[in-house]
Structures are given as structure tokens and as C-alpha cells.
Amino acid sequence: MRHPKLIIAGIGLAAVAAVGGVTAAAAGGGTSYSSATTGHNAAAPTVRTASATVAGKTETILVNSGGLPLYFYRPDTAAKSLVTGGVAALWPALTSAAPSSAGAIGRLTVVHDAHGHQVAYNGHLLYTFVSDHPGQVTGQGVQNFFVATPGLTPLASSPAPAGTAPAAPPAPGYGY
């Protein structure tokens, strides 16, 4: 019987995520994405772009090094994550002490918070969703989380890099 092992493994992953010990790559079963946190795979960007189907349309979105879609939580501020407890277990924060990007036009920063070195894109703190797999977006609009895109409008305290004019964020429920 494999089901009890899967349940126990899932509970263990949720428990570790709840205390902030799971990075987005570990939650997705992907490879390490930051030499600063693991010492491996230093060339892999923390954030990159990829195509995925979001609400029935193919969109360019932000993903982690393992290909998992990245989301932002609308109530967060540029300086503070409001994702805690059981929500944090379902939505692990993307963490890296030295994030890098490929294909993303926005600004990556690190916010030191309860999740550790949480990565932000244009001031929006980033998360993955435990139900996603690479190339699969299932968390769009769930619990006020929305898919992060390269044109995500910077928060007021996080200016855009010179020369960029990102699109405005979509209305709640659409997010693409």
C-alpha cells in the first residue's frame, strides 16, 4: 500500500513548509536554484519566464528554476508577507539570498521576513502553489493569489528599472 506513505510524506512536507523550511524548488521536487542556499546549480536563474495556460489562454508567466509558476499575494506589501500558518503551507515562499533572473524585465529584490530571504519581483513577494507542476497553473485567483507575469506593475516602494513601462495588474479574478 503506497497511499499511507504518500499521505505521511505530504503531511511532512506541509509541516516543514509551515515552519518555513521548504523552498519553492523543494516543494516542486525540482533542483536547487541558488548557490547561496545550497551550493549547487549556481547557473540556474531563480526566476525565469515560460509559457503556460492561464484561464484558457497561453501567457508568458514567471516560474522558478524548477518550472513551477510563481504567484503574488494581493494583500502583501513590498516589505511584509501576510502569508502565514496553513496558507503558507499551501503557498511556499520563493526564497534565495542571491536571486537571479532570465527573461524577466522587472526588478528582483530580497525581503528578509518570517520566510527567510523571500524573493520579490517589482516589490511583489513571490510564492509557488503546492498543487502545481511545471507548466501547470492551478492557483490563479485562489485565496487572493495571482500568477506573476513579466509586466507586473511595481508596487509604489519598488520602482521599475529605467526604460520599462509594465502593464497594470489585472482586475481580481483574471490576473493575466
Image: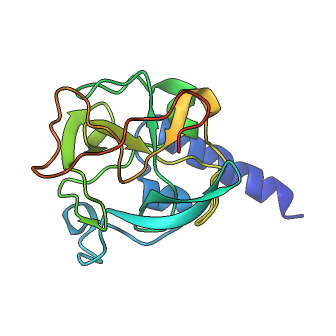
Q: Nearer the viewer, residue 78 or 154?
A: 154
Q: Residue furthest left?
A: 162
Residue sitting at x 47%, y 57%: 61
Q: In the picture provided, is 127 more to the left or to the right than 44?
A: right
Percent of width and height locating residue 44: 31, 74
Going 24% across and 46% down the picture, which residue do you hit? 165
Q: Quadrant of residue 62?
A: bottom left
Q: Is residue 87 above or below residue 109?
A: above
- Give the quadrant of the N terminus: bottom right
Q: Position of residue 163 (x, y in %)?
A: 13, 52
Image position of 92 with respect to 102: above or below: above
Rendering coords of residue 114 (x, y %): 31, 30
What count of labels does the image hold?
A: 0
Residue 3 appears at what percent x and percent y? 84, 57
Q: Quadrant of residue 111?
A: top left
- Which of the colour schemes (rainbow, by chain, secondary structure, one colour) is used? rainbow
Residue at point 36% right, 54% down?
150
Query: Could you tell whether 146 is left or right of 163 in the image?
Result: right
Q: Nearer the viewer, residue 13 or 108?
A: 108
> Residue at 22% of width from left, 63% of height from top?
100
